[in-house]
Image (cartoon, rainbow, N blue to C red):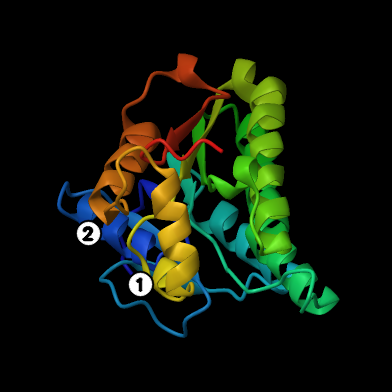
Amino acid sequence: MKSNPPDILLLGSEGSLGSELVQLWLGRDLGVFGIDKHPVSQHDIGYYQVDCAFPAKVQEAIQVVTLQYPSIKAVVSTLGVFGQNDLEVYDLSAFQHSVQVNLMAVCAFFIGLAQFYVKQMKPLRLVAVGSAAGNAGSQDFGYAVSKAGLNGLIVSLSKAYASKGITVMGVNPGIFDSSMSRAVPIERQEKTIEKTHLKRIGTLSEVSSVVSYVALEAPDYLSGAIIPVNGGQYT
């Protein structure tokens, strides 16, 4: 574990987008503390293993962060799991798992840390990476419901805490090249790509550059905003 205090807490540090952000921030000499379900991190960063499918483990992680690193500047969530739930193969347990990881865990981290930083009278920036599915829907009900919920979380937290120094924003990518998108059947990928104006899949760097800007450089007056990065995939 790195001894230097981190600048950024990254939820989902071991996924495709999380890894891209880690490399981007390390290249700028920023300290990163990662949280994910993998036993160890693939990156040279501070790291804490948490399976966000378990609420109690999430609460433990929040306590670790607030006790060990009470001066983080930004919290960025790239947490996400994607399944194949639809009307024909719907499974309640899979739906609940998706909502827990994609939405409830993010809510717990963001609300818990926002309240902590307000009490400490310290500023904090919260950035949730959602999905175009939050507006356009998805065959994976749990994923779409969760990402729509993140939209509500961002606006609600901003309304409650922006005047107290907690800036809250979201980035909603459309389909982009990642391990998650590659696991989607090619027919579904092609249909989604066809809905974009550019008629192509997004790149990791196109999404990560926007997330990094929102997390570190965007003005506080952007609080409550949810930025689409979808190549024109609006419906």
Quick check: 15 above or below 200?
below
The x and y percentages for residue 20 are: 28, 59
> Residue at coordinates 55% horizontally, 57% vertically from top-left?
65
- Say which residue label 2 marks: 23
Give SS at disc 2: helix
Q: Please identify the residue farthest to the left as the structure is shown.
A: 27
Quick check: 125 above or below 63?
above
State which tag comes first along the sequence, 1 or 2.
1
Query: Is residue 47 toward the left or the right of residue 3 in the image?
Result: right
Whether residue 180 is visible here, answered yes or no, is: no
Give SS at disc 1: loop
Mark 1 vs mark 2: in front: 2
Number of callouts in the render? 2
The x and y percentages for residue 31 are: 29, 53
Along the viewing direction, whichever of 158 and 124 lies nearer the viewer: 158
Quarter where residue 154 is shown: top right
Along the viewing direction, whichever of 221 and 179 lies nearer the viewer: 179
Q: Amino acid at mark 2?
A: Gln
Whether residue 109 is visible here, answered yes or no, is: yes
The x and y percentages for residue 160 are: 72, 24
Query: Is residue 215 toward the left or the right of residue 65 in the image?
Result: left
> Residue at coordinates 35% horizontally, 37% vertically from top-left?
197
Mark 2 crowdedness (10 Å alpha carbons): few <14, some 14-19, many ≥20: some
> Residue at coordinates 31% horizontally, 34% vertically from top-left?
213
Q: Amino acid at mark 1?
A: Met
- Say which residue label 1 marks: 1
Mark 1 crowdedness (10 Å alpha carbons): few <14, some 14-19, many ≥20: few
> Residue at coordinates 73% horizontally, 56% vertically from top-left?
104
Along the viewing direction, whichever of 211 and 219 lies nearer the viewer: 211
